[in-house]
Image (spheres, helix red, strand yellow):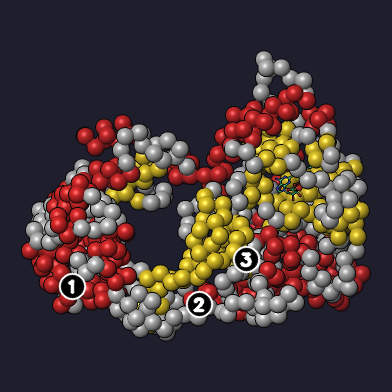
Amino acid sequence: MSVAARVEALREEIERHNRAYYVLDAPIIPDAEYDRLFRELQELEAAHPELRSADSPTLRVGGAPLPAFGQVRHRVPMLSIRTETDTEASGAEGFDARVRRELGLGEGEPPLEYAAELKFDGLAISLRYEHGLLIQAATRGDGEVGEDVTQNVRTLRQIPLRLRDDGAMRAPVLEVRGEIYLRRDDFERMNQRQRERGEKTFVNPRNAAAGSIRQLDPAIAARRPLSFFAYGLGEVQGWPLPATHGELLEAFVAMGLPVCEHRAVVLGASGLVAFHREIAARRDQLPFDIDGVVYKVNRFELQARLGFVSREPRWAVAHKYPAQEMLTTVEAIEVQVGRTGAITPVARLAPVFVGGVTVTNATLHNFEEVERKDVRVGDTVIVRRAGDVIPEVVAVVAEKRPTRDLFGGEPLHPPVVMPTHCPECGSAIEKPEGEAIARCTGGLYCPAQRKQALLHFAGRRAMDIEGLGDKLVDQLVDGGLVHTAADLYGLTLEQLAGLERMAEKSARNLLAAIDKSRRTTLARFIFALGIRNVGEATAKDLARYFGGLDALLAASEERLQQVPEVGPVVAASLAHFFAQPHNREVIAALRAAGLNWTEGEAAAAVAAPLAGKTFVLTGALPTLSRDEAKDLIESRGGKVAGSVSKKTHYVVAGAEAGSKLVRAQELGVPVLDESQLMELLEQ
Ligand code: IVH
């Protein structure tokens, strides 16, 4: 084989592997083999400069740094799109109505076809292919003139240097437009690496993507794990345009360009609304950030008729979701002491609307995190709230830190340091070597831990004492009326009625609720004890295995480890808890106070009709609450899990069911409504 032929064969093979690895996510050969092919090509090109070519994969590692980026005038300007922030229905309906009016369509005429896709949160890029070869990549800039970032863009393995399709190879010019973005996991990894090297971290994937593409040193860009999705066209010469946007995206796929799979061609406003809703339900599971969806009139001929207003197409609109990240200021940094003594720093914030709710507190996780992010009182911070996740402080906006003088002198507030003693009880705070969490060593001596333990004990899924909330627990503990959970059962009407804001009627109700809780189940009782690492599911496993409390109390650590689903960590927590005389005393006092359950009842549930069946609940059921449905299923021996997988037997869906329902449909898991669930339970 001639050198030229070998070089050509290597290029083809390497690009095939790039595609398998970066686009299809299905690598064919081990990394070491890939590296070997790559080095061979590099050596041949070095020895034979006449064989170098614009589409060689060796260019993907980046060349010498640039003094500055050149300018590129876009022959077809890169426009922006109008943004709607309205509700799911009115945003889509408003757009559909405008388009129909512009096209002169009457009420009676059929619904229009739209292409619906995601609005990626990255950096817009224009890729210029001439006769199928990537010859230039440019940023949007002001829409007319952008920056020439060809060298950096070539380092993205997802972007083909040569289009695979014959038609595209014949086209003198084919400009592909799309978005360069970073997946969240790649972003986390990249920041981790930046930290390890003591370099600046990025606040979000979009900034990181933009910063990477605008790096003058292509070798740096080459190390950044950037991704790309194609979604539109710029200048085109000699390529027959398909009739619709949907077909254009299919053509991109055929050329080897990455196109996001979350796209659809839908009919009318109702189709747009359904797409908006479906993506909203999946937003948190997507591996990358989006800030909304984009609707485009599908037929290019209609797009041409609609045209543009003030640099925005009339045929497209971006429909945004509530922002998941917002700026606000830190008013205070406080410390919370949890049930197990875990010390959590919490930022009190100026109220801010983020992720669909008003947020006034955000967790800072632990003091290592506070130190790393250097969060101080007065700082402007980015707060993130995605899905049901607890709001967190992502980063500080360093430029906005208040200083003692106007000229950027010393910061107004010192760095936050971890307290050495518990703010609640004064006990020492300990942070075991290698662990991120610091804990108050006060145990149940610490009123904060005691209060949390009582709240947990009284919780709905534990002893279910209605009316025993945090204000009341504060009073009971601070007033010295209650030291342990057992003391709750000795409370009198006089004691309760004497408390602040406690009418006699509420006092009576509370006493009745406490009394009612005496009758319980072994599983609830074990869970209510608040043993570290023993959640509801483990408590049930223990109750089922031991059948009675005495057997559990008598079990050695080795015996505990024999319980299915109980590992060494849980067994150690249990053994530690039961070894403490104080805990045994509380348990004895609770039994003396009349707490009772039927021994062996949970063991009987194994034989129940739904034994071995896993359910997932989603959405609001018409009559049953979540907890009631869960209890009913469990009383028949079934299990309720939090997420849908292939192992789920049934999904029970109510109104406004979200991603779990979508997932069930994808996996073919049977979906029940409330009445079907009841039928199953009655069988
Ligand atoms: S189409 C003429 N489609 O949003 C219409 N844009 O404000 C051109 N974007 O700068 C844009 N996802 O960076 C289009 N699926 C998508 C998009 C998208 C993200 C960005 C793009 C553009 C901005 C428009």
Mark 2 against mark 3, which lies toward the viewer? 3
Q: Can residue 409 be seen in this view?
A: yes
For numbered disc 2, what is the local secondary structure? Answer: helix
Give the labeled residue for mark 1.
583
Q: Percent x, y for residue 219? A: 77, 73
Of the image marks 2 and 3, the number of the one nearer the N terminus:
2
- Foreground residue, 333 or 321? 333
Q: Name the residue under label 3.
A: 380
Above or below, 320 against 522 in this view is above
Callout 3, which amino acid?
Thr
Q: Name the residue under label 2.
A: 368
278 horizontally vs 182: left or right: left
Real-space CA distance between mark 1 and mark 2, rounded to the nearest whole angstrom: 32 Å
Q: Which residue is drawn at 64% across and 27% down?
A: 268
Secondary structure state at the residue bearing disc 1? helix
Residue 113 spot, x, y in % from top left: 68, 29
Could you tell me residue 214's position as x and y percent? 79, 65
**Type of the residue with mark 2:** Glu
| The quadrant where residue 654 appears | top left
